[in-house]
Image (tube, helix red, strand yellow):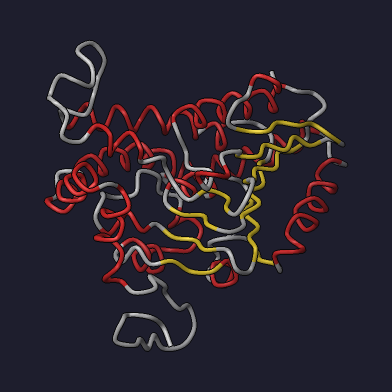
């Protein structure tokens, strides 16, 4: 199966499966093909008796910069029946929610599988990148990683909502209501990730943690992962994921979302992203100390 993957690298060694998102030219943007292959690779690892834990990471400059928006730009402005006359497009609220629920079912494998998954986050971990990272059992980030959900500014609500279980309601709102980003080091301070380390030590940090898990019986790893996740379920974590997709479909009805789509279709994604983000300056939040900004909205 490993040789059949086109968008990721799958390898098993020393009791671990390494799943590497492998679209570096697109900053590992999450296409539907990649999401489908990731789901298959996760269950493959869960079914492999030689695997105790999974490391999820990205190739190139980023963990993942988000969902692949290319289909959005190419579809905008098309005739109403050009997408498909048989399968769901995005014409109605229910179609929209259905499409997002399909993607969610694929990534929920991280939460549902028996074996622990460790996210090794470097570079950009934005939008959809956070959707998969925060479903992982443990997230370890590079100090200089960039973590956030900029699409909340003009593209909808977050279709995956594990944030509150990691960093609490106030920081979740701080991030959602501005689309700002923080560094890996700052994310560790608020509990959004377990810890951060210098970028050149990130791989070793993750590998040594998995070395320790490999010494544990897989049945015990499963029992201890699942009891924690069951507690999360009792706190509503699973239910809120389903509701989050419907909430995102609701948010897609906002005028700014239509405007983003119009610009993307007429002028291209680069122009739409500039329209969305330029007014926010550097787009950064500061975890400690005052946020003093210059006239261009950049932290000083």
Q: Nearer the viewer, residue 229 or 102?
A: 102
Residue 68 placement: quadrant? top left
Residue 45, horizontal then vertical, whole percent: 70, 27
In the rendered image, the residue lying farthest to the top is 86
Picture mark count = 0
Residue 34, horizontal then vertical, whole percent: 52, 31
Left or right: 229 with respect to 218?
left
> Where 74 falls versus 175 (above or below)?
above
Which residue is depicted at the point 21% across and 41% down?
A: 265
Q: Nearer the viewer, residue 170 or 204?
A: 204
Residue 176, horizontal then vertical, whole percent: 33, 61
> Where 223 falls versus 1 (above or below)?
below
Which residue is depicted at the point 52% across and 63% down?
A: 146
Q: Nearer the viewer, residue 79 or 178?
A: 79
Which residue is depicted at the point 18% across and 44% down?
A: 266
Quadrant housing the C terminus: bottom left
Which residue is depicted at the point 55% across and 65% down?
A: 191
Quadrant housing the N terminus: top right
């Amino acid at each position: 199966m490993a040789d059949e993957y086109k968008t990721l690298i799958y390898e098993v060694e020393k009791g671990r499966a390494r799943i590497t998102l492998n679209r570096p030219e697109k900053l590992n943007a999450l296409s539907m093909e990649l999401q489908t292959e990731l789901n298959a690779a996760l269950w493959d690892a869960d079914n492999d008796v030689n695997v105790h834990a999974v490391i999820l990471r990205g190739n190139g400059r980023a963990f993942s910069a988000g969902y692949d928006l290319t289909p959005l730009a190419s579809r905008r402005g098309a005739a109403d029946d050009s997408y498909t006359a048989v399968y769901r497009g995005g014409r109605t609220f229910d179609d929209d929610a259905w499409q997002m629920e399909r993607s969610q079912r694929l990534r929920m494998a991280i939460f549902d599988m028996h074996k622990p998954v460790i996210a090794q986050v470097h570079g950009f971990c934005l939008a959809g990148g956070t959707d998969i990272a925060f479903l992982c059992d443990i997230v370890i980030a590079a100090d200089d990683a960039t973590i956030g959900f900029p699409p909340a500014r003009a593209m909808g609500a977050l279709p995956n909502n594990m944030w509150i279980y990691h960093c609490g309601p106030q920081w979740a709102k701080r991030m959602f209501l501005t689309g700002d980003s923080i560094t890996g080091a700052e994310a560790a301070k608020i509990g959004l990730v377990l810890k951060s380390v210098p970028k050149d030590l990130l791989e070793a940090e993750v590998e040594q943690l998995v070395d320790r898990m490999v010494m544990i019986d897989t049945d015990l790893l499963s029992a201890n992962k699942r009891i924690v996740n069951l507690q999360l379920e009792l706190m509503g974590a699973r239910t809120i994921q389903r509701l989050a997709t419907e909430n995102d479909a609701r948010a897609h009805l906002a005028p700014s979302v239509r405007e983003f789509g119009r610009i993307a279709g007429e002028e291209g994604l680069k122009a739409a992203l500039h329209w969305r983000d330029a007014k926010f300056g550097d787009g950064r939040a500061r975890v400690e100390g005052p946020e003093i900004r210059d006239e261009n909205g950049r932290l000083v």
